[in-house]
Structure formats: structure tokens, C-alpha cells
Image (cartoon, coloured by chain):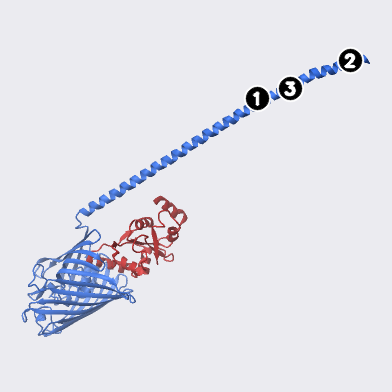
Amino acid sequence: MRLFLILFFLFLQPYAYGAEKEGLIVIVNEKGPLTEASMEEVRDVYLGEKRFVEGTRLLPVNFTEGPLKDLFLKKIVGMSSKEYKHHWIRKVFQEGLTIPTTMGSPIAIIEFVVKEKGAVAYLPASWAEAILSGIADVTDKIKIIGP
Amino acid sequence: MKIARVVFLVFFFFLFTVVPDSGADELSDLKKAVEEQERELQELRKKVEELEKKRLEEEDAEKKMDVREHEELKKKVEELEERRRLEGEAAKEMKELLPKFGVNLGLFGDINYSSESREKRVDTFSLGNAALYSTAGYGERLNFLAELLIEFEEDNDVEVDMERLWAGYTINDLLIIRAGKFHTPVGYWNKTFHHGKHLFHTVERPFFIKFEDDEGIVPVHLIGLEFSGSADIGPAKAKYWLMVGNEPVIENGKLKPSNTTDDDSSKALAFRVALSPKRLPGLSVGLFFTHFPVETTLKPGLDENIYGLDVHYERAGLEFLGEYYFFDNSVASANAFYAQLSKDLGRFTPYTRFEWLDVDSDDPYMSDLNGAFDRSQFIGGLRFDIDLLHSSLKAQYRHDDDRGPADDDFDIFEAQWTFHF
């Protein structure tokens, strides 16, 4: 499945990580507790303010540093990268929390979201069509919830 | 004429008996040839059919081999994936068994320079504190934190204090239970900023909420139980902290948390609730309260109460932070507040702060504390982030005004290099 995804996106889907005009999508596990979450709730998850829903531990995933992450922080979290880092330094030192996972590969992110019920992540908007168009083993396991 | 007729008859007799024999032979030959050819054709057809059959059988056999090989490969991949999954789970279990102290280990430190001040009587460099901390979590709900502070005293002695040590369990977002030593939820600053000076803009905390051994007049540590949580309450998000623990004591003019024993069975209580309105992102308003019995010289068994309000607003690089404290007991009351403003300009952050304390000379609580006298401070400074996460430089001017009988004022220049690794 992994090789198929790689080839599919190489030959059929040109993508650019984080071009601001492209936009982004927020994805969650189809069977998880965040399928009806608002972007405000997604913000709370990424700030460590919301950690559990219906007994399921929430697992936010950040993209590696770059335009896509900056766009997500600006549009959804409402913070600059600097403010976000400061927020999490305080969270770690104050409450002993763990910083959200960081991944740089959309395919690794998709695989993680498929595997973990409490996962939430974001991708460039160009991946929306690919996810919805019926890729084997993915379409019915991932839901796009915004923005 | 008769002879011609006879010849003609013989000729024709001969023609019909001999010639017909020749045509019949040829026909027979032809017939034989055709039959022969038909036989050969049938044999050829038979051979083609046999070859076709053989080809189909071979194709079928090849297909079956492809399917078989494909099935075998698929099975191998599944076995490898299952093996990888089991190894991953085994590694995860092993990781969970191993000690985690040091996995998330950090240190906050600072080096300072100050001109003559109330705290430093000469221009001087000084080592600040080294705050060593470690955090760890097991499973989804259990986590721990330890913060050890190495302090350098005026007489060059080194003091080591366990500033925070707690174990916590998360039931859900509404209820987190911790036991140990924490910062009290008295105000925004004390719950947000601990001993790491890299975490805040100014060189030092507001003077009346300094740590107990630095002559602060608010009990900023408590040993006991903490219940905290957060909830969405419609137009706002709410967070709360409730603590119950050992009451502090006053020794040699300083407050002191009771790490190992309490003076009596009555306990200190601290509570804070903070609301963040959804329509005003970046704003947080908190109400806090603490009650603690404390032995004082003028009145033994005094019940001291501190009520307060804190406001924090941060948006587009602009940050405002302000807190008001009302100290109250059965004899007297006191007021304190500070207001701080800063602006993020990339790597530079200019800031300013005003602090005020007003006490009653008859107050038994304030009378026993070295740091409790009418005082105000004005601070203006600049922070430069060498590295956002790891190091900063601060330079500030501070006017320290003793508004009491001593009337001891200072104009101080201070610089600080903070680091975190």
C-alpha cells in the first residue's frame, strides 16, 4: 500500500508543502472521537488544553518546521511559530506534558492517522482529492474535518 | 460405305472402351488424391487441436504458478509485517519498563550583572539559580515532574532545594490529580513561570511574589494535593486549580513552605479559576484566593487570606499582564499590584512594568516579613533572543522606591544572560 501511495502521488498529484495559497486540510481517524470536532477544538488539542475525548487519548501531529506548519498555526491555532514554541516550553516545564509529535512525510502522517484512533493531523489541501478519490485502504479510514 | 461404317463403329467402340478407361483412371486418381489430402488435412487439424490444447494447458499451469507465487509472496509480507508489529510492541513494552529519568531532562540557568541595589550593595556579577528539571510519563495518564534548584547565597554558600516534586494522574480533561510540592495557583505569574528565568521577559519576578527565600510575601509553594482541570462552558473556556496542603511558617523574616511536617492539623487552601472568552482570543481573566493559618509574633494562630484578580492578554505580539492582591486578616489589610506590558518585535522584546505594595504597620503578618514594607518599582528593559528556545540577553533599568520610613531609593542597571538546555 505504501509503494502504491508513493507512486500515485508522484505521478498523479503534484504537491507543494505549505504554499500559502494552496491551503490545508485537517484529517482525523474515521473511527476516532474527533470526527465532529470544530477547528476550535482542534486548536485546543494542539495547545495541549484538550487531551482526552470519550476516554481516548488525543494525539496531535505537527508537520516539520516550514510554511505548512506556519499556515496551520496562523489559521487554526492563532499563534506565530515563536508564540507556539513558548507556549509548549511552558507546558512541558509547568505540567510535565509532552510536545506533539512531528512528522515530515504526508504518507507517514496518513499511516499514523489510520492507525491511531485519537490522531489528528494536517496536510496540504492538494491531498484532499487523493484521499477522497478512493485510494485503497485509506478513504474509509480517514475523515477530513476542516478547515 | 459399309467398310467406313465398320471402321467408324470400331473407332467409336475403341473410343468408348479405351478412352473412358483413361478418364475413369484419372478421376479415380483425383479422387484418391483428394481423399489423401483430406486425410492429411484431418491429421493437421488434429495436430493443431493437440497443440492448442497443450498451449492452453501450459498457460493454465503458468497462471496457477503466478497465483501460487503471488500468494506465497503475500503471505511472506504479512508474516514480516506481523513480526515487525510484534517486535514494535515488544520494544514499546521494554521502553515502558526502563527508567525515564533523564529522557526529558533540562536545566535553566542565568548569569547576572547588577549595579548597586537593595539586593546587591555593590556593582557585581552573580551566578543566578540553576534549575534542574525532569519530566516523565507512563501510559496515557500518569506523569511526574521534579525540579531541583541550586542557589548561591550571599555568603557564597550553595543551597539545594527541591522546588517541585509531584506525581500526577489524569482522569480526564476535567480532573487531574497531583500529589507533591507545587507552585500555588495564586495569580497568573506564579502558576505560569517557575524558576527558569528564560521563560519570562524581565530579569526578575515582581518583588512581592518573589520566592519565599528571596523575601516574597506570598506563599508560592505548597505541599499537599492539587486538583485541576479545564472545561468548555459555552462562551468561554474555564480552567481551575484547587490545592490543599501544609501551611507555611515564618522563620527569620521569611516565609517557608513546610516540606515534611505541618505545625498543626489545619491546612492551607488555594484556589484559582481562569476564564478565556471565546470572542476575545488571547484574553484570560483569573480570580484567586488562598487561606493559610500562620504563627506570627504579634498574633499567634493568625488566619491570613489573600484574594486577587489577574488579567493576561496576548495578541499579535503585544502582551499585557496585571495582577492585584488584597491581603486580609483579622487585624489589618494590605494591597499589592503590578502591571507589565511588552511587545514582540521579532528577536527583540521591549518591556515595562510597574509594581506597588502598600502595607499597614499594625499588620501582624506583614510585620514579621522582611520584604513587607511600602514599596514600588518601575522597570524598563529590552530582551534579545539569541536562540528562542535556549538563550536570551536582557538589559533593564529599575527604579526601586522604598516609600516607607527608610526612604531608601535605588536606580539600578541590570543585565542577565539566560540559558536552557
Which residue sits furthest right?
A: B1
Q: Which residue is mark 2?
A: B6
Q: Colour of chain A?
A: red
Pointer 3: residues within 10 angstroms few (<14), some, or many (20+)?
few
**Residues at marks 2 and 3, CA–CA distance in whole angstroms:** 30 Å
Q: Which residue is mark 3?
A: B26
Chain of residue at mark 2: B
**Residues at marks 1 and 3, CA–CA distance in whole angstroms:** 15 Å
Q: Secondary structure at mark 1?
A: helix
Q: Quadrant of the N terminus of chain B?
A: top right
Question: Where, by quadrant of the figure, is residue A9 drawn?
Answer: bottom left
Question: Where, by quadrant of the figure, is residue B129 drawn?
Answer: bottom left
Q: Colour of chain B?
A: blue
Q: Amino acid at mark 2?
A: Val
Pointer 2: residues within 10 angstroms few (<14), some, or many (20+)?
few
Up-down relation of residue B401 to residue B258 (above or below): below
Q: Amino acid at mark 1?
A: Glu
Residue B36, image x, y percentages? 65, 25
Among numbered discs 1 and 3, the one appearing first in the sequence: 3
Q: Which is more foreground, mark 2 or mark 3?
A: 2
Q: Amino acid at mark 3?
A: Glu
Q: Which is more foreground, mark 1 or mark 2?
A: 2
Query: In the image shown, does B220 or B195 lie closer to the viewer?
Result: B220
Chain of residue at mark 1: B
Residues tagged 1 and 2 counted as in contact (Cβ below 8 A): no
Please give the name of the residue rendered at 24% of the width and 52% of the height, measured from the top-left corner: B93
Residue B176, image x, y percentages? 22, 67
Among numbered discs 2 and 3, the one appearing first in the sequence: 2
Query: In the image shown, does A53 or A69 lie closer to the viewer?
Result: A53
Q: Which residue is mark 1?
A: B36
